């Protein structure tokens, strides 16, 4: 295991893949299936264009990225793990103090496989969800960022497939095939988790998704980076370094839209000038935030207790916690009856681990919204974006069957139905946002509804040509 990466092999890696011929062969057999999936389900219409992408060249904290023009199917997807720390011991749950596992413990095999498959399933799902967005990109800068996110989600799939192939034998290989077979939004073979079946066909949705849903990824990966199963922990650690850019794309994307909207508010009606009104942006935030809260699973979960007890999935920054068994401790959980009457239950802390992770996520999202509101304030705009309460619009967990307004007031189902369109994007909102989508492909130009970024990727100038269209491309110009 080294921090530098071997790019001379068919599958770039820092796990000495050539020393395990069987595994190498299995992954080389999976590779063409992956490429077939990528060319049919990946970004449509752009597979032959040259995109200014970063590729990982070392797993060191700084300086791991290399930037160059690449055709997406030629991207060097590889297997990169943070180097092993041989002194690492299990530091939470029932196995504290034991050396971390380098192989899958038999009694946790099915549970671990399920966690890895669930994580792996989200990665190709997001690429499928975003596959048509390039055709209506608001700029070349944004187009390049979309593709950077897409190729890295492809690499995250590789990360999970490596674990399945090397540690789970035949059923791991079968799961790796199934990861290429399910399809986002397909009623017959949907992706596993809710948010990954929702359509993303406009850029406001994309920026909300990369803000809120990729951020679920950050927290789930942080919890898996604590795992007693060391290969999973090290894989998750390296994935987190890539994840930061995805959330940057989302957060700055929404911020640039808000800035533009605030500018347009000074000169008249936002909609009449072709911008995105704040109330519509708020409804998209409400949707993607609530869908993403669902991804943490139930507030009170026997699965979560088992994952923690078995030392498979820890808490965010487990080392900072006062205590690491989570036994004989309780979490004060808000619950409601069908009439909306509140009670506070004492839930055993292990059973509340999904909610503990969600708490960290909610704090992080609040910071993001504060930065958005600062941008509005800087434009002299009095409007503000607000996160809905966590009970709002939930489909998983203890709040699932109960209706709440974004500010936490209980509603009957009939009241909810009457007011739904003021909380979540309506058909009219969606068709208006879609009507704003058109391709802007001249270097340095931006769609009317979004402001330019404050700086370019790798400090490139504002008119940098991030994507070079080749003859045959839908955006190619002579
Ligand atoms: N939709 O006790 P429960 C990312 C299922 S994002 C549908 O409530 P548990 C990325 C659950 O699977 C990060 N089903 O929850 C972002 C279980 O089913 P089974 C992805 C759901 O098990 C952007 C049942 O309900 N990583 O990386 O404690 C772009 C009862 O489960 C949902 C992970 O998720 C839902 N929302 O926790 C690209 C980490 N929620 O098993 C990538 C791995 C729950 O009874 N996964 N269910 O059939 C996990 O840690 C856990 O599986 C979950 C659920 C946190 C998801
Ligand atoms: Fe990912
Ligand atoms: Fe991501």
Image (tube, rainbow, N blue to C red):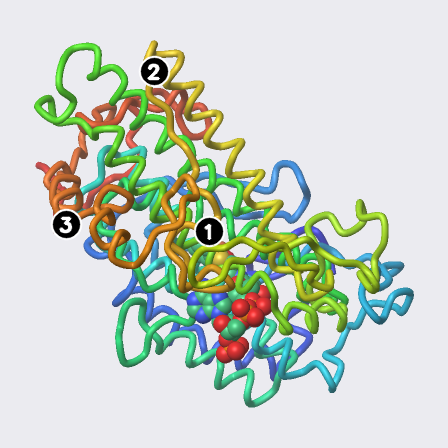
Residue at mark 1: C-beta within 8 A of ligand 1: no
In terms of sequence position, does the residue under pointer 1 or pointer 3 come before the other? 1
Frontmost residue, 141 versus 357: 357
> Which badge, 1 or 2, comes first in the chain's sequence?
2
Choose the circle earlier in sequence order: 2 or 3: 2
Q: What x and y, as percent, mark residue 430? A: 17, 46
Q: Residues within 10 Å of mark 1 (few under 14, many from 20)?
A: many
| Placement of 168 over or under 215, stated as above or below | below
Disc 1 from disc 3: Cα separation: 23 Å
Mark 3 Cβ and ligand 1 under 8 Å apart? no
Q: Nearer the viewer, mark 1 or mark 2?
A: 1
Q: Is residue 465 left or right of residue 210?
A: left
Residue sitting at 50 percent across and 64 percent down? 397
Residue at numbered disc 1: 391
Location of residue 226 (image quadrant) = bottom right
Residue drawn at point x = 56 percent, y = 38 percent: 364
Q: Which residue is mark 2?
A: 382
| Residue displayed at 20% across by 50% down | 418
Tell me the quarter of the picture where residue 41 sits. Answer: bottom left
Q: Are marks 1 and 2 in contact (CB under 8 Å)?
A: no
Secondary structure type for disc 2: loop
Q: Position of residue 368 (x, y in %)?
A: 49, 32
Residue 121: tell me if it is visible: no
Quarter of the figure with the C terminus: top left
Q: Is residue 261 left or right of residue 368?
A: left
Q: Quadrant of the N terminus?
A: bottom right
Name the residue nearer the viewer: 225 or 272.
Answer: 272
Q: Secondary structure at mark 3?
A: helix
Which label number is shown at residue 427?
A: 3
Q: Secondary structure at mark 1?
A: loop
């Amino acid at each position: 295991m080294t921090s530098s990466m071997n790019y001379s092999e068919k599958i770039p890696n820092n796990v000495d893949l050539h020393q395990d011929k069987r595994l190498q062969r299995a992954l080389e057999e999976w590779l063409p299936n992956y490429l077939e999936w990528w060319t049919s389900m990946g970004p449509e219409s752009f597979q032959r264009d040259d995109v200014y992408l970063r590729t990982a060249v070392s797993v060191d904290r700084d300086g791991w990225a290399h930037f160059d023009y690449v055709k997406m199917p030629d991207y060097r997807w590889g297997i990169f793990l943070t180097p092993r720390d041989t002194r690492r011991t299990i530091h939470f749950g029932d196995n504290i103090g034991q050396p971390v596992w380098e192989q899958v413990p038999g009694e946790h095999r099915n549970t671990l496989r399920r966690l890895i498959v669930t994580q792996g399933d989200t990665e190709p799902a997001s690429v499928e969800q975003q596959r048509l967005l390039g055709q209506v990109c608001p700029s070349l800068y944004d187009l390049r960022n979309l593709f950077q996110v897409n190729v890295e989600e492809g690499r995250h799939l590789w990360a999970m497939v490596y674990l399945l192939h090397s540690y789970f034998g035949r059923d791991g290989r079968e799961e790796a095939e199934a990861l290429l077979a399910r399809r986002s939004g397909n009623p017959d073979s949907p992706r596993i988790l809710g948010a990954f079946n929702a359509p993303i066909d406009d850029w406001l949705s994309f920026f909300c998704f990369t803000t809120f849903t990729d951020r679920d990824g950050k927290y789930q990966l942080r919890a898996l980076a604590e795992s007693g199963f060391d290969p999973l922990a090290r894989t998750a650690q390296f994935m987190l370094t890539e994840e930061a850019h995805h959330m940057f794309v989302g957060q700055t994307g929404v911020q640039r839209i808000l800035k533009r909207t605030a500018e347009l508010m000074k000169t008249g009606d936002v909609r009449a000038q072709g911008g995105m009104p704040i109330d519509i942006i708020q409804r998209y935030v409400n949707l993607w935030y609530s869908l993403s809260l669902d991804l943490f699973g139930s507030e009170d979960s026997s699965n979560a207790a088992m994952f923690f007890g078995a030392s498979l999935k820890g808490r965010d920054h487990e080392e900072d916690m006062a205590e690491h068994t989570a036994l004989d401790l309780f979490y004060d959980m808000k619950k409601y009856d069908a009439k909306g009457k509140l009670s506070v239950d004492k839930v055993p802390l292990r059973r509340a681990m999904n909610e503990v992770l969600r708490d960290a996520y909610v704090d992080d999202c609040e910071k993001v919204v504060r930065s958005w509101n600062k941008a509005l304030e800087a434009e002299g705009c009095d409007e503000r974006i607000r996160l809905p309460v966590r009970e709002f619009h939930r489909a998983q967990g203890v709040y699932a069957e109960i209706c709440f307004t974004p500010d936490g007031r209980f509603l009957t189902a009939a009241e909810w139905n009457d007011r739904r369109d003021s909380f979540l994007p309506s058909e009219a909102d969606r068709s208006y946002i879609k009507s704003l989508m058109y391709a802007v492909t001249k270097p340095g130009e931006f769609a009317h509804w979004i402001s330019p970024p404050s700086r370019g990727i790798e400090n490139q100038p504002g008119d940098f040509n991030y994507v070079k269209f080749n003859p045959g491309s839908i955006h190619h110009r002579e």
